Amino acid sequence: MAKLTVQDSALAHASSSTKLGHNFFDRPTLTVAQDLLGTILVRKTKNNLLSGMIVETEAYLGEDDPASHAYGGMTPRNKLMYGPAGFAYIYFIYGNHYCLNFVTEPEGFPAAVLIRALQPSTGLEQMFVDRKGVKSEIQLCNGPGKLCQAFQIDRKLNGISLASDRLFLLPGNAPVQIGNSGRIGISQGQDRKWRYYIKNNPYVSNIKGASR
DNA sequence: TATTGGATCGCC
DNA sequence: GCGATCCAATAG
């Protein structure tokens, strides 16, 4: 592992009291999606410590949201969305990529927040290895599939608790300016402007036509 | 069992 | 702009 800075060491030894806990996630999903902006995602593997600031999220909310996996009711795949808040829901998409979500709201109500982009802060050297071919920091985590590749997140972590030491969140350091828009890559539900991002942050995913 | 299309990405 | 590539969900 690369040498750690003082700040990285603090991440590595984050106590359970500093992590965002169940009561952070067990709230209205649109609130959580916005409050996640500026928080720090931490990933620990056997050999690596990785972290980054969340700069873009999307909310998927209820069985009547036509863009949600929970649209039309519970299935084996979306079952986690109905479970208690504070767990990771990770799925495989388009035959190539994983997407990371955090389950929100009380048990029984299906909802989650998709993490769409991060500003990487720890472990960039390893991220460049895993994101083969990427040239600039900007491209490491500026998309939901990209950040899963950079953070070594796949189906093995599906259902993991965010109180675990392998994947957790720390509070942000400063308030952020929030913008919003329709969600990306969906064919229905564009009337719900449930994508949130940090204004003027260069690590937000670059989608043609999406507002900045 | 077969078919369809997807909360994406990277190359053309 | 389009193909890759796998799998969940649904229909038959």
Image (tube, coloured by chain):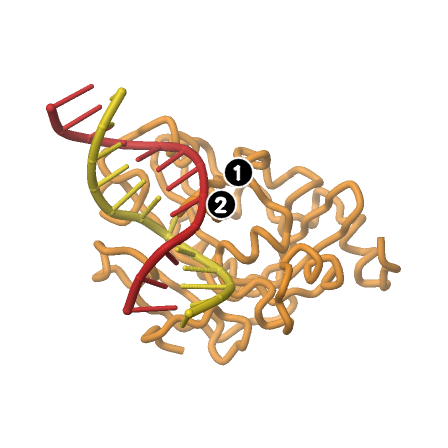
Chain colours: A orange, B yellow, C red
Under mark 1, the amino acid is: Phe
Tell whether A185 sits left or right of A119.
left
Of residues A78 and A29, the one nearer the viewer is A78
Label 1 – label 2 distance at C-alpha: 6 Å
Say left or right for A32 vs A19: left
Q: Residues within 10 Å of mark 1 (few under 14, many from 20)?
A: many
Graded by Cα atoms within 10 Å as few (under 14), some (14 to 19) or many (20 or more), the crowding at tag 2 reads many
Residue A27 circle label: none
Q: Which chain carries label 1?
A: A
User: Where residue A134 sits: x, y (%)?
Assistant: 62, 67
Q: CB under 8 Å between callouts 1 and 2?
A: yes
Q: Say what secondary structure mark 1 lies in.
A: loop
Is A187 situated above or below A92? below
Picture quadrant where residue A156 is located: top right
Image check: A86 left or right of A83? right
Q: Which chain carries label 2?
A: A
Q: Which residue is drawn at 37% across and 43% down?
A: A111
Look at the picture and state if A211 lies above or below A65.
below
Q: Do we see residue A179 in this rendering?
A: yes
The answer, for residue A65, to whether it is visible in the render is no
Q: A210 above or below A16?
A: below
Q: Give the x, y percent position of residue A67.
A: 27, 49
Residue at left 76%, top 54%? A11
Q: Residue at x 75, y 45 (%)?
A: A15
Query: Who is closer to the viewer here, A189 or A148?
Result: A148
In the picture of the structure, the residue carrying the numbered disc 1 is A87
Residue ID for mark 2: A102
* Quarter of the rendering occupied by the C terminus of chain A: bottom left
Which quadrant of the figure has residue A171? bottom right
The residue shown at (21%, 54%) is A188
Q: Tell me where residue A166 appears, x and y as whole percent.
A: 69, 41
